[in-house]
Amino acid sequence: MEFIYEDERLAMSVIQAIHAGDIPSLKHLLTQNPGLAKVKILERKPDNVDSDSRISRTLLHVVTDWPGHFPNGADTVRALTKFGAEVNAPFVGPNIETPLHWAASSNDVQVLDALLDAGADIEAPGAVIAGGTPLDDAIAFAQWDAARRLVERGAIFALWHAAALGDIHATQEHFKGTQLPERYPWGTSTSPSPPDAVTVAFWCACHGGRRETAEYLLDRGAELNWIATWDGMTPLDTAKRNRWVKLIPWLENQGAKSASEIHR
């Protein structure tokens, strides 16, 4: 059994058991249907579309799907992996995110830990954010608990990650010569005219509401009113979006503007 359609009885039953956190029912289904833990769940599309080209997800994607935090999520991960679920199997669709990407995007730390304990690749590529890692997803979607846990568990982080998390020590050490890895939220360093890394880090510090880090980066030449290429927002815009009420007045006092003001 390589795949089943999402509207088949078996698919609906196993998805319901996962979302309900019904571990006994899940184990019963896995026992009665050998190979179910590894199955791909396909969207139902016209019959003339080859199954390999259809959007599909695994059962580990089901337990990490938005909004996450399903009952007994960590136990569900352990049950699925015990029955052979492939912890790094990618989503097939517009991106190739692994279940760990999805757990990070949902801020589901318990499930994230269970996946890592089962051997999930903490540096797996494929994020919806420039094809990056689970840490990229967590920071981009402001899932701070998941982001911090990924760093605690050994995720490689760059200057923009450190800035977003308010790691002033790592940020300062970067400027003292202990260079953080060059990993970019806009793609690779070979991208045409990538924005200045310090400016991006400043934007991310504002995204994370990290005033100390933002001040430090602004003093080191960050562009105050840079408009991010990924969402068209300035540092002030992203601070307002995330309601960082203590950061917003400071930014405005520095002369920060919204993208709409700049365009006018």
Image: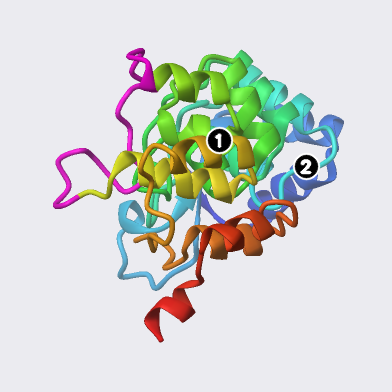
Q: Quadrant of residue 188?
A: top left
Q: Secondary structure at mark 1?
A: helix
Amino acid at dot 2 = His
Closer to the camera in the image, 104 or 86 = 104
Q: Which residue is mark 2?
A: 69
Name the spot of residue 28 as percent of width and height, x first.
Answer: 78, 31
Q: Residues within 10 Å of mark 2 (few under 14, many from 20)?
A: many
Q: Is residue 116 above or below residue 165?
A: above
Q: Is residue 235 magenta?
A: no
Q: Quadrant of residue 132?
A: top left
Q: Which residue is mark 1?
A: 213
Q: Nearer the viewer, mark 1 or mark 2?
A: 1
Residue at position x 37%, y 22% from top? 175
Most common secondary structure along the magenta stretch: loop
Name the spot of residue 61 as percent of width and height, x first.
Answer: 58, 42
Q: Tell me which colouring the rendered structure shows.
A: rainbow
Q: Is residue 121 visible?
A: no
Amino acid at dot 1 = Thr
Q: Residues within 10 Å of mark 1 (few under 14, many from 20)?
A: many
Q: Is residue 159 visible?
A: yes
Residue at position x 68%, y 60% from top? 249
Closer to the camera in the image, 125 or 242 = 242
Task: Using residue 258 as the reference point, say whether residue 82 is left or right of it.
Answer: right
Residue range of the region highlighted in magenta in the rendering: 175-193
Q: Secondary structure at mark 2?
A: loop
Residue at position x 32%, y 66% from top? 49
Name the spot of residue 64 as percent of width and height, x first.
Answer: 65, 41
Name the spot of residue 134 as percent of width and height, x first.
Answer: 50, 35
Closer to the camera in the image, 152 or 167 = 167
Q: Quadrant of residue 147?
A: top right
Give the numbered dot on residue 102.
none
